Image (spheres, rainbow, N blue to C red):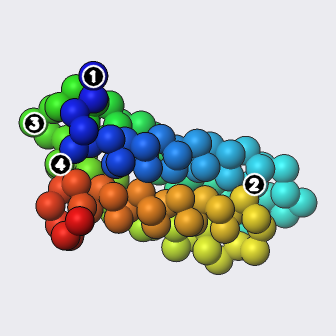
């Protein structure tokens, strides 16, 4: 059972990872994939760190807060890149990344709830 204090952050991490996976896949279908390369890279990095953070929190790891701090930074970078692209999948991803970054910072004690 996941400790309640992690639930909201894990949900945000899972949703963000899913949005990033979808964004990367959809970006590969764009007419000008070259323009999307950095977006795809960050989507993949972000999805991976979100899943890792969720895993650390799920098992109540002593390093969960460290991973959450890094996750927030990578989510911010992904959100910034996705926000530059007008595609709906990028805008949805940027929103999920911003939410996840906020939840991870809150979890890591970097902001108030």
What is the x, y in percent for residue 36?
A: 71, 62
Q: Nearer the viewer, mark 2 or mark 4?
A: 4
Task: State the separation of the CA atoms marked 3 and 4.
Answer: 7 Å
Q: Which residue is mark 4?
A: 65
The structure residue drawn at horizontal position 44% and vertical position 50%, both measured from the top left corner, is 12
What is the x, y in percent for residue 96?
A: 53, 59
Task: State the separation of the CA atoms marked 2 and 1.
Answer: 36 Å
Of mark 2 and mark 1, the one earlier in the sequence is 1
Badge 2 crowding class, 10 Å Cα cut-off, few under 14, some 14 to 19, many 20 or more, is many
Proximity of marks 2 and 1: CB atoms separated by less than 8 Å? no
Compared with 16, 91 (above or below) is below
Compared with 30, 58 (above or below) is above
Q: Which residue is mark 2?
A: 27
Q: Which residue is mark 3?
A: 62
Residue at the front extreme of this rendering: 4
Compared with 65, 58 (above or below) is above
Proximity of marks 3 and 1: CB atoms separated by less than 8 Å? no
The structure residue drawn at horizontal position 27% and vertical position 22%, both measured from the top left corner, is 1
Q: Nearer the viewer, residue 17 or 70?
A: 17
Of mark 4 and mark 1, the one earlier in the sequence is 1
The structure residue drawn at horizontal position 65% and vertical position 77%, both measured from the top left corner, is 84
Task: State the separation of the CA atoms marked 3 and 2.
Answer: 36 Å
Task: State the separation of the CA atoms marked 4 and 1.
Answer: 19 Å
């Amino acid at each position: 059972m996941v400790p309640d204090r992690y639930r909201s952050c894990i949900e945000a991490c899972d949703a963000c990872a899913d949005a990033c996976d979808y964004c990367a896949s959809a970006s590969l279908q764009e007419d000008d994939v070259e323009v999307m390369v950095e977006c795809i890279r960050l989507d993949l990095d972000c999805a991976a760190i979100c899943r890792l953070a969720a895993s650390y929190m799920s098992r109540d790891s002593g390093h969960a807060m460290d991973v959450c701090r890094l996750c927030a930074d990578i989510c911010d970078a992904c959100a910034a890149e996705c926000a530059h692209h007008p595609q709906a999948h990028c805008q949805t991803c940027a929103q999920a990344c911003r939410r996840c970054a906020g939840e991870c910072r809150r979890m890591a004690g970097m902001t108030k709830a």
